[in-house]
Amino acid sequence: MVRVLIIEDEKRLAENIARSLRESAGYAVDCAHDGQEGLYMAESNPYDLVMLDLMLPRMEGLSVLERMRTACNPSPVLILTARDDRESVIALLNAGADDYVTKPFDLGELIARAKALIRRGKGHSSAVLKVRDVEIDTARRRVMRNGKTLALSAMEYRVLEYLVHRQDAIVSKAELSEHLYDFNWERFSNVIEVYISGLRRKLGDKEGDLIETLRGQGYRLCS
């Protein structure tokens, strides 16, 4: 599961980007509309990508970026800017930005750049992830096992994608919840178990040898 923060004071633009990320990629997306709120959210939650406008009220985007990097926040940052002169671009990259797009931008290009940064941030260059005989096409949000396409629910897919990105690591329920939900979702205590159970059934993982449960610790996707 991927969680994205958009820091953009143009609310309609922020919501359009958020809706596209939710619908095209199934990401959990939070929005902040000024620099101080955005910095607080970036410091308080684990994000797989931050989309950051430069011209923000209360704290400009460059200051937000510098504060994030000073605090060793590793989230990839994609800058949204009206500036495209060479000096401004160099200053942004030197301050710790990972990429930038200039306004007005094509929404499809923006989403593609966002997905590429997220993949690189997780150590993957390809949109297709593989674990044993399971193949996850993150661009099409399609899962196959032994060549057979599996009909996963949106939330089951999100859980599986996150576990694949963290394969062989123990992932707690709290960590899964942090990446599974944005601030608009209702949280329920047993929902993670429900999704894991559904995944195991659809993957044919009856013995739990693919998705391992570690009592009191969480889950591990075994490579």
Image (spheres, rainbow, N blue to C red):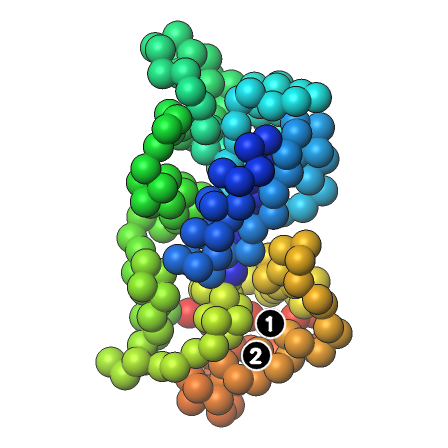
User: Label 2 amino acid?
Assistant: Ile
- In the rendering, at what x and y percent does residue 219 appear? 60, 72
User: Label 1 amino acid?
Assistant: Tyr
Which quadrant of the rendered structure holds the C terminus? bottom left
- In the rendering, at what x and y percent does residue 41 appear? 69, 40
Q: In which quarter of the image is residue 85?
A: top left
Taking the image as drawn, is residue 168 in sight?
no
Residue sitting nearer the eye, 55 or 199: 55
Element at label 1? strand
Residue shown at the point (46%, 18%) measured from the top left: 92
Residue found at the very far left of the displayed protein: 147
Element at label 2? helix
Residue shown at the point (57%, 43%) measured from the top left: 5
Counting residues from the start of the chain, the first of labels 2 and 1 encountered is 2
Q: Give the numbered dot on residue 219.
A: 1
Q: Give the numbered dot on residue 206.
A: none
Residue 52 lies, with reference to residue 66, above or below; the image says below
Q: Which residue is denoted by mark 2 in the rendering? A: 196
Query: Mark 2 or mark 1: which is in front?
Result: 2
- In the rendering, at what x and y percent does residue 36 appear? 71, 28
Circles 2 and 1: CB atoms closer than 8 Å? yes
